[in-house]
Amino acid sequence: MTVLRRFWSVWFAFWLFGYFLVAFPLYALVLWRLTPFTVRLGHQLNRLWGKLILLMGGIRVRTIGYHFPEEPCLLVANHRSYLDIPVCYTIFPPSRGLLG
C-alpha cells in the first residue's frame, strides 16, 4: 500500500507543478503587461490548471442550485483541504476575482 501511495503522490505532484513549469512563460506575460486580455488569459490559465488537477485526481465537482450574485460580495472558502483553490478556480465565473 505504501508503494501505491508514493506513486499517487508523485503522479499528483507531476500534474500540479508540471503545468506551472510549462505555462510559466504565459503567466510571466500576464504579470508583465496587465491588460484586459492578459487578465482574462491569466484567469483562463488558472481555470485550466484547476480542471487539470481535478481531472488527474479523479475528482468531479458538482454545483447544485447556486448562482453568483451580481452585486459585490465576498465568498469565503473554508480551506478544508488543498483542493479548495482548484475547485474555486473551476466554479467561479470569469468575471469574479479570486484571492488565494
Image (spheres, rainbow, N blue to C red):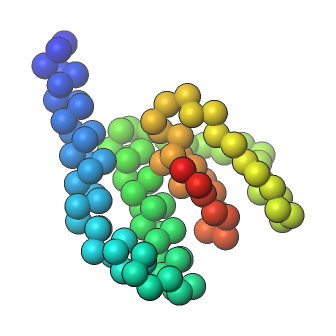
Q: Nearer the viewer, residue 12 or 26?
A: 26
Residue drawn at the location 67% of the way across and 64% of the way down: 96
8 relative position to 81: left or right? left
| Quarter residue 26 falls in | bottom left
Decide if residue 5 is on the left or right side of residue 34: left
Q: Is residue 3 above or below residue 17?
A: above
Location of residue 63 by image quarter: top right
At x 22% / y 22%, what residue is drawn?
5
Q: Is 65 displayed left or right of 92 in the figure?
A: right
Query: Left of 79 or right of it: where is 14?
Result: left
Q: In the depicted view, which residue is nearer to us: 58 or 37?
A: 37
Instruction: State the residue lying farthest toward the left.
Output: 3
Q: Quadrant of the N terminus?
A: top left
Q: Position of residue 32 (x, y in %)?
A: 40, 81
Number of dots carrying numbers: 0
* Residue 4 to residue 8: above or below: above
Please say if 10 is above or below 100: above
Question: Residue at image x 44%, y 53%?
Answer: 50
Percent x, y of residue 87? 53, 46
**Where is residue 94 drawn, in percent x and y?**
61, 68
| Residue 99 in the image, given as x and y percentages of width and height | 59, 55
Q: Residue at x 29, y 68 (%)?
A: 23
Above or below — where is 19 with respect to 39?
A: above
Looking at this view, name the residue that lies furthest to the top: 1
Q: Residue furthest right?
A: 71
